[in-house]
Amino acid sequence: IAEEDIVVTISRSGYVKRTKTDDYRSQKRGGKGVRGTKLREDDIVDHFFVSTTHHWLLFFTNKGRVYRAKAYELPDAGRDARGQHVANLLAFQPDEKIAQILAIRDYEAVPYLILATKGGLVKKTALKDYDSPRSGGVIAINLREMPDGGDDELIGAELVSAEDDLLLISKKAQSIRFTATDDALRPMGRATSGVKGMSFREGDELLSMNVVRPGTFVFTATDGGYAKRTPVDEYRVQGRGGLGIKAAKIV
């Protein structure tokens, strides 16, 4: 199979496709753009990224499992097509939804994978530990019951080295930044639960996890439509597990 650059599109309801990058013609800034996919009225695009047909795609679900497929296994469809449901490609369990997708050339691409849950747990594991051919997926993280009795869920996955900084931001706009060194975040096995990355006040939970690098910016946006850009250096490095500092003022 020839290696080609592709655009991968996955909707919230689980429709997936790959499209040749040539189908997205270069345009001038400020226009209306072109249709990227055909969706039902109640569906939206959740994941949209460039990869190649030879990359592995790792599908992490809210239930803490990970499945994989070669990008060329995705249905090849044009910009106006919806694609096929992911259930035709991967053997998801009931009520599983895609939480994050990562594209990798191979399992030596980076040293570690870090996972985060809405309950504030984080886990660092060697990426090569997830190299499994099982069609039914494998456990990526063991999820615990939340303090309020609810079920925890996986919300994020990132590829990292031990020198990278992580920024966690909660739904109520608290944030905490810490470094993924082995001292601060020791590597753990695949079927473990992780450690506390962030603590929360009542009613709060983790919204996002990102790798941040010096000299870059953090872009935050609220449900009410307010947005801002802040230098990442304004988010000081702290120890993991605390309540963190305010990332934005919620009105």
Image (cartoon, rainbow, N blue to C red):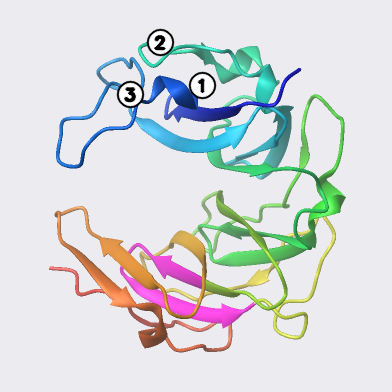
Span highlighted in magenta in the image: 167-179
* Relative vertical location of residue 84 with respect to residue 106 in this rendering, above or below: above
Report x, y in % for residue 160: 67, 64
Tag shown at residue 242: none
Horizontal arrangement in the rendering, residue 145 relative to residue 171 (left or right): right
Residue 201 appears in the figure: no
Q: Residues within 10 Å of mark 2 (few under 14, many from 20)?
A: some
* Relative vertical location of residue 5 with respect to residue 79 in this rendering, above or below: below
Numbered disc 3: secondary structure: loop
* Relative vertical location of residue 230 with respect to residue 14 in this rendering, above or below: below
Report x, y in % for residue 140: 74, 48
On-image quarter of the C terminus? bottom left
Residue behind mark 2: 81
The kind of residue tagged 3 is: Asp
Mark with earlier residue (3, 1): 1
* Relative vertical location of residue 136 with respect to residue 183 in this rendering, above or below: above
Q: Quadrant of residue 231?
A: bottom left
Residue behind mark 1: 20
Q: Residues within 10 Å of mark 3 (few under 14, many from 20)?
A: few
